[in-house]
């Protein structure tokens, strides 16, 4: 019996008799550590501005609240959540911007690229 096979058979016998089950991993294969797996965060929802003009960012979900800036058409932004607010052309949903950016944008002019949860 070659040395490699004898070592493998011996290790298998040791595992079987000790009651411990280990997963076989090919040599050189990288396995994620427990720390890496625990750090993995879900991907935040994103949306694309589909208005023809710059889209106003508002302090609250209404057109009459304080203007905070604007997003250019075609801009992809992170979205935190959605909330009911003032009706904009038949749509009363507003998105709270994510990634630490303050303010809301009218959902009427943002194409969500992934599901966006309701604000709590």
Image (tube, rainbow, N blue to C red):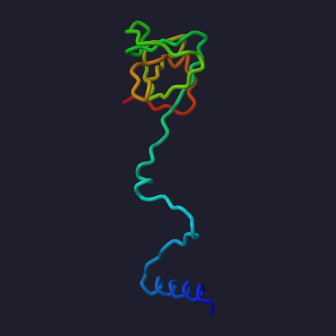
Residue at image point 38% right, 15% down: 60
Q: Quadrant of the image for the N terminus?
A: bottom right
Instruction: Examine the rendered structure and indicate whether residue 8 appears above or below residue 68.
Output: below
x%, y% of residue 93?
48, 20
Front residue of this view, candidates 64 and 13: 13
Q: Quadrant of residue 5?
A: bottom right
Q: Nearer the viewer, residue 60 or 44?
A: 44
Specify whether 52 is left or right of 21: right
- Residue 42, image x and y in percent? 47, 42
Residue 29: image location, x then y, percent: 56, 64
Which quadrant holds residue 110?
top right
| Nearer to me, 17 or 92 | 17
Q: Percent from the top left, x then y, of residue 3?
A: 59, 88
At x 59%, y 14%, the residue is 51
Q: Is the residue 103 above or below the residue 1 in the image?
A: above
State left or right for residue 42 relative to residue 26.
left
The residue under the point 44% across, 12% down is 69
How many badges with numbers are in the image?
0
Q: Name the side, left or right, on which 5 lies relative to 116.
A: right
In the image, farthest residue toward the bottom: 1
């Amino acid at each position: 019996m070659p040395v490699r096979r004898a070592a493998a058979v011996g290790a298998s016998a040791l595992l079987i008799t000790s009651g411990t089950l280990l997963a076989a991993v090919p040599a050189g294969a990288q396995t994620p550590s427990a720390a890496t797996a625990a750090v993995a965060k879900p991907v935040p929802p994103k949306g694309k501005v589909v208005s023809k003009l710059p889209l106003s960012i508002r302090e609250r979900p209404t057109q009459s609240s304080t203007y905070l800036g604007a997003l250019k058409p075609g801009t992809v932004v992170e979205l935190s959540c959605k909330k009911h607010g003032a009706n904009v052309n038949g749509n009363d949903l507003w998105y709270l911007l994510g990634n630490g950016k303050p303010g809301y944008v009218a959902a009427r002019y943002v194409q969500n690229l992934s599901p966006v949860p309701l604000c709590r």
